[in-house]
Image (spheres, rainbow, N blue to C red):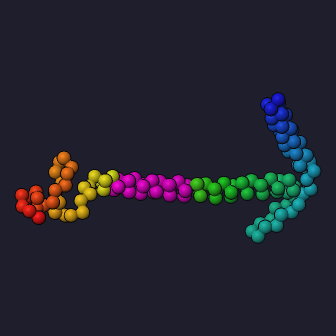
Amino acid sequence: MKRVVLLLGVVALIAAALYLGFAFPTANTTPVDLDLLAFRVEAVEIWVLALCAFFAGVAVTSALASFLWMRGAVLRRRYRKVIRKLESEVHQLRSLPLSKDPDTQVPPDGDALPAAEAAGGRG
């Protein structure tokens, strides 16, 4: 049932688009003169002007959206590089011993001994 309603909706949208696609040019056939700053265009039908304005808007919007998308892609790549660098720095810091005393020696078994005890004296 859901598919039938969806199919009917899609068919209705296509039929409406076809009807408007044929009805709009036939209803707007009045020729107008277009006087721009640099030149003059004579006897252009209104539906042609509307169609050109629509596609000009699509072109400008697409150009702006693609510029913003490319800018975002460059920023994401730059941030990923910084994140990788910082993660490697954190990994290097994790491998350092956690000794507060600079004289403390860390034997291979992991028990920290003060430098005086390691040298055999009393501290």
Q: List the single residue furthest toward the left.
A: 120
Residue at 11% across, 58% down: 117
Examine the image and state in which quarter residue 114 appears: bottom left
Q: Main secondary structure of the magenta part?
A: helix
Residue 17 covered by magenta stretch: no
Asked if residue 21 can be seen in this view, the reply is yes
Q: Is residue 9 above or below residue 122?
A: above
**Nearer to us in this view, 41 or 27:** 27
Total marks in image: 0
Residue at 17% across, 48% down: 108
Residue at 87% across, 55% down: 45
**Nearer to us in this view, 112 or 10:** 112
Residue at 61% across, 54% down: 66
> What percent of the width, then of the height, locates residue 104?
17, 60
> What percent of the width, then of the height, locates residue 38?
75, 68
- Which quadrant: the N terminus? top right
> What percent of the width, then of the height, locates residue 70?
55, 55
Which stretch is magenta?
Answer: 70-90
- Which quadrant: the C terminus? bottom left
